[in-house]
Amino acid sequence: MSAFEVNFDGLVGLTHNYAGLSFGNVASQSHQNETANPRLAALQGLTKMKTLSDMGFRQGVLPPHERPCTTTLRQLGFSGSDAEVITKAAKEAPRLLAMASSASAMWVANAATVSPSADTLDGRVHFTPANLNNKLHRAIEAETTGRILQQIFSDSRHFVHHAPLPQHASLGDEGAANHNRLCDGYGQPGVEVFVYGAGAGQPGPVRYPARQTFEASESVMRLHQLSPDRTVFVQQNPSVIDQGVFHNDVIAVSNGPVLFYHQDAFLNPQGALDEIASKLAETGCRFQPVEVPVSLVSVEDAVQTYLFNSQLLMKDNGKMLLVVPQEAREHPGVWGYLSSLIDQGRVIDEVKVFDLRESMRNGGGPACLRLRVVLSQAELNATNPNVILTDSLYHELTHWVEKHYRDRLAEADLADPQLLEECRTALDELTQIMNLGSVYPFQR
């Protein structure tokens, strides 16, 4: 069966700011209290989408969430009109207001786990929104994420939508950021690799939390009707989590038969690689691992540059393009490694650099900004066409951003009730542009 990989990028929201909310995310915390530029952040993301689309890669767009989330603030005891709720929260609990105002839904690698129809027992694409229960500002995303995905992928003949896993620490689920799929062709059965940080009776990190649990990954496998014979569970190395590798996609990335990973990524790397290779071989696919040795790129360098939080994209000739942030080019050691890798001309033979500084300073690189969805032609035809990037949609979204977004936003600005009205006005217009219906709380 012929199928395609479609990258759905998150459109950066109007409240993009540097509140430093993500404990364990070094970039997020190190830029706390700086002034952000939401307009530039959104335009940088759109530039990446448009460039990759122009290069022939299929590209979709996922909308931001409504922020500040007054529903959450009301659940936390603030009352009155929406403006009064925001004013009270700013005065009495500014940290809670910051959490309710986070634009973190932009990092849609955490939106959901997606299994393509080639892997599932019922032959449909399965979606499970991540519960993201390790961080309050992210745990509030699941409901809206689910509604958005259901509006985009609405045809039940092709798509199945599951509820997020229960909000309990033992079932922490961070979505596709800890999920890889390896395959020969996108439409062929593949091997799904779930990477977890804690659970299964294994020791976890000490300094920073392990956000993904084995129990959550196993639950998603069951929900998605995946064969255990084509599923692998791998524990992330606890020591790299304690060095700021909060998700697997900060230390490894895959596409097709290729796994690009750091030497220290996994707790038992040889066992994991052997199991992946064995199960892939049963599908007729030859595993192609590309290990980056610690002697050339340290974990600290990987976290600083987000070398592995890159997009690995398959070109028409079967070779891979690696999409990296500007920070990777500016680091002599990392750029030296990449230059050597490309000179070898093996499976990864091209690098494309993007300026995503606004997102990077908040803790997310190219891979964080996209959710990969493998679709057959029939499934793509059944997808809401208004979210697939075209020249027309790109120009319309660019105009929308320039019209509605502020060009500076500090954490203190979150206390301005007008920001909520600006967000709602913009999102109401966006849902019409993308034909999404009433997906936001204020529209319902």
Image (spheres, rainbow, N blue to C red):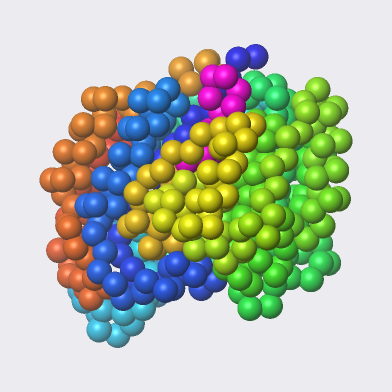
Along the line of sight, which residue is nearer the eye, 285 or 1? 285
Question: Is residue 9 part of the magenta span, yes or no?
Answer: no
Residue drawn at the location 33% of the way across and 32% of the way down: 50
- The answer to which image quadrant residue 51 occupies is top left
- In magenta, the rendered stretch is 312-323
Question: Is residue 316 part of the magenta span, yes or no?
Answer: yes
Along the line of sight, which residue is nearer the eye, 122 or 356? 356
Q: In the rendered image, is residue 123 in sight? A: no
Residue drawn at the location 84% of the way across and 29% of the way down: 281
Residue drawn at the location 18% of the way across and 41% of the way down: 400
155 left or right of 276? left
Q: Is residue 404 above or below residue 154?
A: below
Residue 360 drawn at (x, y percent) = 40, 58
Residue sticking out furthest to the bottom = 92
Q: In the rendered image, is residue 61 in sight? A: yes
369 left or right of 87? right
